[in-house]
Image (cartoon, rainbow, N blue to C red):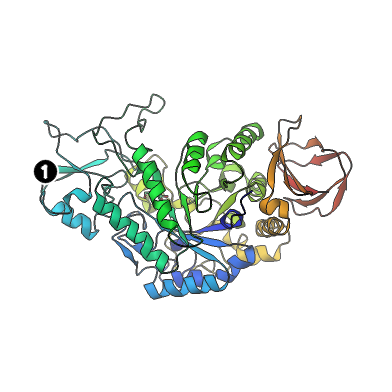
Amino acid sequence: MIDSKWGKRVIYQIYPRSFKDSNGDGIGDLNGIAEKLDYLKDLGVDAIWLSPIYRSPMRDFGYDISDYYNIDPIFGSLSDFDSLIKKAHGKGMKVLMDFVPNHTSFEHPWFKESRSSKNNPKRDWYIWKSPKKNGAAPNNWLSQFGGAAWELDKKTGEYYLHTFDVSQPDLNWRNSQVVEEILNVLRFWMRKGVDGFRVDVAYYLFKDPFFRDEPHNPTHTEHHIHIYTIALPETLNMLKTLNSVINEFDDRFMVCEIYTFLHEIVNLYKIVDHQSFVPFNFSFISLPWNAQEQKKFIDEFDELVGHDYFPTYVLGNHDQPRIVTKLGEDAARTAALLQLTLRGIPFIYYGEELGMRNVKVPEKKAKDPMAVNMKGFNFGRDPERTPMQWNASRFGGFSSVEPWLPLEKKFKERNVASEEEDKKSFLNLYKSVINLRKTRKSLAGGRLVPLDFKNPNVLGFLRQKADEKTLVLANFSEEKQIVELPKGSWKTILSTKLDVENRKEKGQVKLRPSEGIVLCR
Ligand code: GLC
């Protein structure tokens, strides 16, 4: 198996607005992150990925960039970023940036020029189309944030395309100047020492050159099947190009946001460099919490990806409800155990390690454009973006003033300081499993051997390197389950309840409701 450095790294996603506020404005910032690097190091994190910190009017909280070459003052300055990189590298940690190539902000100077007249040299940097004869939008494409994906610009009488918010016009990737400029953005940050990127909506870059209507999705009246806007062959080729730019530099890495099916994820792996490029796999988010469905996916995925490539596993992010809110605390602990013991790269979303929950944000106080544009649908992503809970002080140790989003009500019990004290806390589960992952060579780089039990509620697998074997068992049900162990003498070295250590097992083991365990010989 390829001994990839990135394949062994634990990656932690920081939503910078919500991690740590160092200057008392209620919004997290770069110096705040720098203050907390020791915490992350102690947790066992090898690389941090920062959601966008570029200059932005913040209509979509940084996913609407107005200057790719600068840091938004809300987060700090370029020199703050330089010192964050230096500090992280000094502790042996890598730094990944978010990278948003599909669209800019409508306040980006490129778009301002582009919209100024039909003859402007930057007109073709974005996607402009004339109205239909009756004045309607050029086709039926829909915005991911609700309504049409087209906005009429009165001044020039044409529509521009915005796959997301109206404030996020799509760049025209068929224009070679755009491509060149964007590739240079990657190089600019890598020269500054950035170790790689998470590519936002990587499957959306190219759109059908004939702008054909998309077919309606019969299962969702409001939706279309995106055959002309997502995953075009040109997009796949461009991802290869992005990958080659990463490879101009040493030990750099790229992870792409694509929500798609197993076979498409696997196909993507096959066209890129296994050392430096991975697509996200959101199966823990998209599939039901069911041992058989998860097992089917994991076994097939691991085999098709192959030993030279690394799967990824994700439980949550800034666009998805928090895992504890979806599954409950016990099952979420077991999900974390699986994520951290499977073969592949785990991405931990900030606060997941504390068992943070979604926080209800009343519609009137909604900040997320998705919630604001689609009122009444309960679509907003604010609930999973609330401030990190550091301690029991007035604003959870996040800030000295009222934070931009409310704290979880129970932050006084659920926070870093109190969980560090509690031997059985979520935080200590994460620390213990990450530590196991780093100390057992079968977990760090072993193969995955699928196992079949006669019990449909239990998912189990073996990780194996040379003669070291680690066995992981997960009970997906809320009842206790009995499992016959593979031959040999086994001892349980860890339970998600954190109350078992070195327990010898005799032939079979009893799993408590929703419990996950790790065994070795
Ligand atoms: C991605 C981001 C999401 C953002 C959208 C538009 O899905 O994760 O937060 O709103 O792209 O950039």
* Horizontal relation, residue 90 to residue 61: left or right: right
The residue that appears at 65% across and 32% down in the rendered structure is: 292
Dot 1 alpha-carbon crowd within 10 angstroms: few under 14, some 14 to 19, many 20 or more: some
Please state which of residues 156 and 280 is positioned toward the viewer in this rendering. Answer: 280
* Horizontal relation, residue 457 to residue 13: left or right: right
* Horizontal relation, residue 224 to residue 211: left or right: right
Give the x, y percent position of residue 155: 10, 49
Identify the image quadrant of residue 448.
top right
* Horizontal relation, residue 69 to residue 195: left or right: left
Q: Which type of secondary structure does the marked residue at label 1 adopt? A: loop
User: Which residue is labeled 1 in the image?
Assistant: 157
Q: Is residue 185 visible in this depiction of the protein?
A: yes
Q: Is residue 63 above or below residue 231?
A: below
Q: Is residue 496 above or below residue 85?
A: above
Please state which of residues 500 and 504 is positioned toward the viewer in this rendering. Answer: 504
Give the x, y percent position of residue 138: 19, 35
Amino acid found under the numbered disc labelled 1? Gly
The residue that appears at 62% across and 36% down in the rendered structure is: 294
Q: Is residue 388 visible in this depiction of the protein?
A: no
